[in-house]
Image: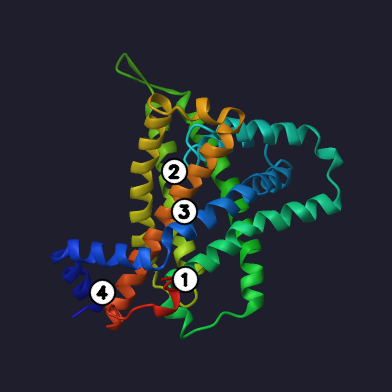
Amino acid sequence: MDTFGHHARDILKHPGAFTIRTLKAFKANQGLLLAGAVAYYALLSIVPLLILIVIVLSHVIGQAELLETISRYLEWLIPGQSKAITSELATFMDHSSVVGWFLLATLVFFSSLAFTVLENALSVIFFHRVAIHRRHFLVSALLPYCYILFLGVGTLVVTLVAGALEAMGQERIHFLGHSWSLGGVSGMLLYLLGVAGEILVLTSVYMVMPVGRLSLRHALIGGAVATFLWEITRHILVWYFATLSQVSKVYGSLTTAIVVLLSLEIGATVLLLGAQVISEYERISRGTSGERLRSLRTD
């Protein structure tokens, strides 16, 4: 009998028990505290990372098209605030001639901070792996920069595909005297492109960031579940900020930073919770689900 299928069926028979076990483990690992740390460093890294991507890819793709693509899919990460960030990117690019080697090195360093902290947070979630395997420090040092390169290539591909889909959306089909616009099809394909990219990025995080080897099937399931949860959360955030939120009246000029940080923290919580689901499944498979992580307790 397939081990994966056996344990999956057991979980499906008792989903409530597995959910409670996962949430308890997430709390024991100080999941919300880890998510806050990841969100803070992601806030520090997001603008330098995007600046690097725009500087490099603007030699291949038009700057306006590149910023439009970044703004569209940045909306998935920070609902309602993508225009503010892309506006800052455009302003920086207008003065990109002043970028020297020192500033470039600073941008590279700050771009890598979020990935470094994320790796450390996942090492807490997958503590049972760290106790067995150790990662060479050079791998940990180079991993964030590999991810920066990966995201840069991904942005290039998405921009090219999105441009082709937008061009398709301007076309019309004429048949038997009737005419249909392809705008709706183009919009749906652009949305599906974003979902597929989100699943791919999250799957790669679960595959590469934690210590040890994870099967593609487990990582893909974790990426799909985290994407599903984030899509629900993202639409709730869009609705909340558009209708009920009074954050601009409370924080004034700090509103953008507060909303971005809040969105990043919720996203980091979903990401780490997905990792905790995978971790608990692994521990069930190994028969160690009852072990307590005493070294992580704070009381």
Residue 118 visible (yes or no): yes
Badge 2 local density, few (<14 within 10 Å), some, or many (20+)? some
Q: Pointers 2 and 1 in contact (CB under 8 A)?
A: no
- Mark 1 to mark 3: distance in Å? 14 Å
**Considering depth in this image, is 87 or 55 the residue closer to the camera?**
87
The disc label shown at residue 193, or none:
2
**Quarter that holds the C terminus:** bottom left
Residue 254 lies left or right of residue 54; in this view the side is left
The disc label shown at residue 124, or none:
1
- Amino acid on which disc 2 is placed: Leu
- Amino acid on which disc 1 is placed: Val
| Mark nearer the N terminus (1 vs 3) | 1
Image depth: mark 1 or mark 4 in front: 1
Badge 3 local density, few (<14 within 10 Å), some, or many (20+)? many
Judged from this view, the residue extending furthest toward the left is 13
- Amino acid on which disc 4 is placed: Phe
Residue 62 visible (yes or no): no
Q: Residue at left 50%, top 75%?
A: 211
Badge 4 local density, few (<14 within 10 Å), some, or many (20+)? few
- Mark 4 to mark 2: distance in Å? 29 Å
| Mark nearer the N terminus (4 vs 2) | 4
- Mark 1 to mark 4: distance in Å? 24 Å
Residue 203 lies left or right of residue 51; in this view the side is left
The disc label shown at residue 4, or none:
4
| Mark nearer the N terminus (3 vs 2) | 2
The disc label shown at residue 268, or none:
3
**Quarter that holds the N terminus:** bottom left
Image depth: mark 4 or mark 3 in front: 3
Percent x, y for residue 101? Answer: 85, 53
